Amino acid sequence: MSYQQFYSGFLSANSHNQHYACHSHYFWPDCTRDAMLAYWDDSAKYVDHKWGFFFETLVPELQKRISTLLNTGAPEQIVFAPNTHELLYRIMSCFDMTKPFKVVSTDSEFHSFQRQASRLEEQGAIELITVATQPFATFSARMKAAIAEHDPHLVFFSQVFFNSGYVVDDVSGIVNSVSNDNTLIVVDGYHGFMAKPTDLSDIAHRAFYLAGSYKYAQAGEGACFAHVPSGSTLRPAYTGWFAEFGHLDKPRKIAGKDAVQYSQDGMRFAGATMDFTALYRLRAVLRLFEENDLTVQKINDYVMHIQQQFLSELAKQDHSVLNETNLVVKEASCRGHFLTFELPNADVTQALAASLKEKGILTDSRGNRLRFGFGLYHTPDYINLGALGEID
Ligand SMILES: Cc1ncc(COP(=O)(O)O)c(C=O)c1O
């Protein structure tokens, strides 16, 4: 079984390399190229009417597909944006920014959250409570305890941590432990979406879920989304004209309190004009998977199998630092689609990544952690670690 036929363009452009960074930049299936041309053709055809056309065809189809993939039962609650940072900041803008608000999060959130939260903390705009993700075995209990102790305005955590690949198996438990109905809850699902089978049915009424297409959805940058909790009446201060699409809360008023109206569904969290090319790519990939009966479960089974093959090949190398002992997440059932090795320090890590790159083995590193990602365009034959070598 091979899926390489879907990726001929990216594979031939990278035929001299082994690409193990799909957890950062997944190769795009060939159908995304046609999708980009289709976007051009539709823009030419519909010109001034293209937004109406996109919002009547493309957007509902994607909302339905994503909602089905995540089992939210509420397609109208999906809203798109070019990146998740914009969505995060829009959620944060629901708080009264004149008073500090309390946030419980983890020490392993991606920079879009971590940097923004740190900057707001510097300004005294938020009080940030950070829960360590390790030891993983007790993470969920410690996260729940921090939420109970601090009663925060916002809870933010990842489904799969970007710096280890650890999969939080108790997302629902953490969300449902939040007893204060006014607390906003955001799950960063970027490393889960289209990689790990995900069922949001029991938290869709309560939590935001953020993800995008840059990684496992394989459609590149520019197509991120949020599932907005059903029935949300929040009024983000950071708002754009797309948020008025669809049915509005109330008739428009010219001025006065509550004059700004919002769409009744997830579109209330929309921004403004964006390039929909990426959404065309995303639709093409999701259609491709459906046509080929490629469910997230099947993708996960395939990728985890390849990951295991890689580890078997790696064991034969008997490498001094790249070995199972240095894996951050040792249990395969708790792992996302990439392996993270913890090395002695950042210098060793960078030197090793650079030496691998010279040998055509492409990875990526974060501090003293080296990550190898696996995807549908890998096969057992693709893996060739004969050239691995030791670091000098
Ligand atoms: C966990 C996680 N969240 C979000 C993102 C992307 O954030 P943004 O869409 O703000 O660029 C990434 C990486 O690209 C990530 O690893």
Image: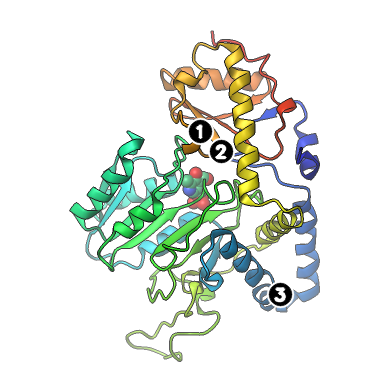
| Badge 2 or badge 3: first in the primary sequence | 3
Q: Is residue 176 above or below residue 345?
A: below
Residue visible at 44% across and 85% down in the picture? 249
For the residue carrying disc 1, how many other residues have a C-alpha within 10 Å: few (<14), some (14-19), or many (20+)?
A: some
What is the x, y in percent for residue 52?
A: 67, 78
Q: Nearer the viewer, mark 2 or mark 1?
A: 1
Query: Along the line of sight, which residue is nearer the eye, 314 or 212?
Result: 314
Between 73 and 367, the residue placed more toward the observer is 73
Residue type (three-letter) at the residue carrying disc 3 = Lys
| Label disc, if present, on residue 337 of the rendered structure | 2
Residue 351 at x, y = what percent? Answer: 52, 18
Determine the secondary structure under disc 2: loop
The Cα–Cα distance between marks 2 and 1, rounded to whole angstroms, is 10 Å
- Residue bearing the label numbered 1: 332
What residue do we see at 38% from left, 74% from top? 235
Location of residue 13 in the rendering, given as x and y in whole percent from the top left corner: 78, 35
